[in-house]
Image (cartoon, rainbow, N blue to C red):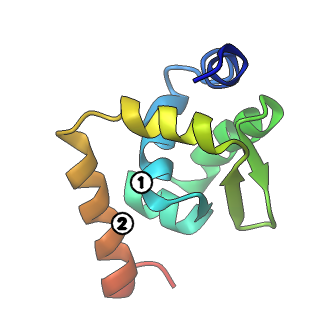
Amino acid sequence: MPPNQHDRVGPATSVTDRPILSVAVVIGDEFEIPILAAATGIAREQIQPHLNELERGGVLQRIDEEKYRFVDAAARQSIYDSVGTAERPRYFWRRNRIWCVGIVR
């Protein structure tokens, strides 16, 4: 990854942002806040300040009231690659359970 992309992800993310980003990258390039909240088990009210900070840092872009997307595909891939191989299947399982069972909506 070029240095400017790594810089965008590194300083723009705090230790508390990482768990949220780890689940968000598994959800996809775009994600909805209710699905992210359900998949992380973190209330929307607690997630929103992190999303706002990540938006200010240039990592995420708000699409509408419920949806965000990753600004840079290479930065998203870097975050995805940093998610442990043991964690990824668990996050995929959570995401798929939400989509299939309809926990949200």
The residue at which mark 1 appears reads as: 26
Please tell me which of labels 1 and 2 falls first in the chain: 1
Q: In this view of the protein, which residue sits in the foreground, 2 or 31? A: 2
34 vs 54: above or below: below
Where residue 26 appears, as percent x and y from the top left, is: 41, 54
- Give, as a three-letter code, the residue at label 2: Arg
The residue lying at 59 percent from left, 44 percent from top is 46
The image's mark for residue 61 is none
Count of numbered circles on the image? 2
Give the quadrant of residue 73: top right
The residue lying at 56 percent from left, 67 percent from top is 34
Kind of element beneath mark 1: helix
Res 40 seen here: yes
Q: Is residue 33 left or right of residue 77?
A: right
35 vs 37: above or below: below
Q: Is residue 74 left or right of residue 51?
A: left
Where residue 75 appears, as percent x and y from the top left, is: 60, 34
- Give, as a three-letter code, the residue at label 1: Val
The residue at which mark 2 appears reads as: 95
Q: Is residue 91 left or right of residue 31?
A: left
Where residue 84 appears, as percent x and y from the top left, is: 26, 33
Res 42 seen here: no
Residue lying at the far front of the rendered structure: 2
Q: Are marks 1 and 2 in contact (CB under 8 Å)?
A: yes
Tag nearer the camera, 1 or 2? 1
